[in-house]
Image (tube, rainbow, N blue to C red):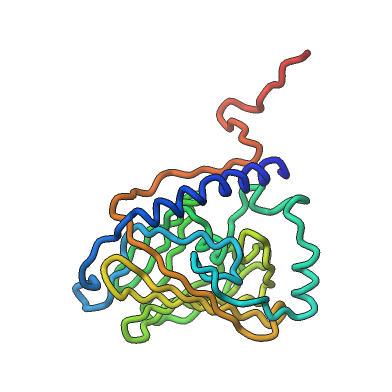
Amino acid sequence: MKTHFAATLLAIAVMCPALAEGQQAFQPPTGPTPRLPSGKVDFSGVWQKPYVPDMTKDGKEQKGLAELPFTPWGEAEWKKYDAAEGDYTGACLPFGMSRSVNTPEPMQLMQSDKYFTFLFEQNSWFVVVPIDGRPHRQGIATWFGDSVGHWDGDTLVIDTVNFNGKTRLDTIGHPHSDQLHLVQRFTRPDLGHITWEVTVEDPKTFTKPWKNARTFTLRPDWEMMEYSCEENNKSLWEGRIKVPKR
C-alpha cells in the first residue's frame, strides 16, 4: 500500500504543474449566469478545480490561514500523521467530501430543482444531494457524510454531517473527527465561474469554525472519464497475478 500511495503522490506532483499551466492558458466561456426554467441558478457543467493539497491555503493565490485552530486532540492527530506509513487512499478507500473537492481531477455538477449531484472523476464517485429543503437523514455514518441543500438567494448551500471520521480533509492529511460539519456555498457570478466557500466545523478537532475559498472554472472542452482504483492492481477476472519462479 505504501508503494501505491507514494506512486499516487508522485503522479499528482507531476500532473499538477501541467494542470496549472493549462488553467492559465484556457479562457472560460463568457456570458450571463445560466438558470433553470424555475429561475434558480444552474451550476451544471464540468468544472476545473484548483488543486489544494493544503486547506490552510485558498487556491492558486495560496492565501488563507497561518495555521488551523486545533484542539489538543486535533493537534495530536495532525502531528502523528505520516503518509509514508500508509494513507487510506492508498487502499482505494473513499476520499470523503472535503478531500474529493480538493483533488485536481475534474468534477461534473448536475442539477434539477430537486437534486444537486457531484460527479467526481476521481474513482468515479458520486454524491446526490436533495435540495428541496428536507432535513438530514438519520442513519449510519458514511465516508462522504449526509448532505442536504437549500437556497440563500442565488447561493446554493450544501450542509453535510454524519461522517464516519475515517478520512482526511486534504492531501497532506489535516485531520477531522466524526463530529465534522461542512457547509459549502456555491455562487455562480457568470457563465464561466463558480465561487466556492466551505466552512469547517468540528468541535473535537478545532476550537472554532474556519473557512476556505476558491474559484472553479467551467470546462466545456472536457468530458468525464472512467477512473478505477484497485488496490494492488490485480486482475479480478484473471485471478491472482502469478509471479514466475526464478
Q: In which image quadrant can residue 29 be found? A: bottom left
- Image quarter (top left, top right, bottom left or bottom right) of the N terminus: top right
Which residue occupies the foreground of this view, 29 or 74? 29
Task: Estimate the x, y position of residue 90 in percent, counting from the top left.
Answer: 66, 48
Is residue 91 in view?
yes
Residue drawn at point x = 62 percent, y = 52 percent:
93
Task: Estimate the x, y position of residue 122 in percent, counting from the top left.
Answer: 50, 51
> What residue occupies the far top of the structure in this picture?
246
- Image quarter (top left, top right, bottom left or bottom right) of the C terminus: top right
Task: Estimate the x, y position of residue 94 in percent, counting from the top left.
Answer: 59, 56
* Image position of 185 with respect to 169: above or below: below
Tell me if 240 is positioned left or right of 80 in this view: left
* Image position of 163 with respect to 237: above or below: below
Residue drawn at point x = 49 percent, y = 64 percent:
60
Which residue occupies the foreground of this view, 235 or 46? 46
Q: In which image quadrant can residue 4 be found? A: top right
Is residue 35 in view?
no
Residue drawn at point x = 30 percent, y = 58 percent:
27
Task: Estimate the x, y position of residue 212 in percent, counting from the top left.
Answer: 53, 75
Residue drawn at point x = 80 percent, y = 79 percent:
72
Q: In which image quadrant can residue 37 be found? A: bottom left
Tell me if 67 is positioned left or right of 198 in this view: right
Tell me if 213 is positioned left or right of 31 in this view: right
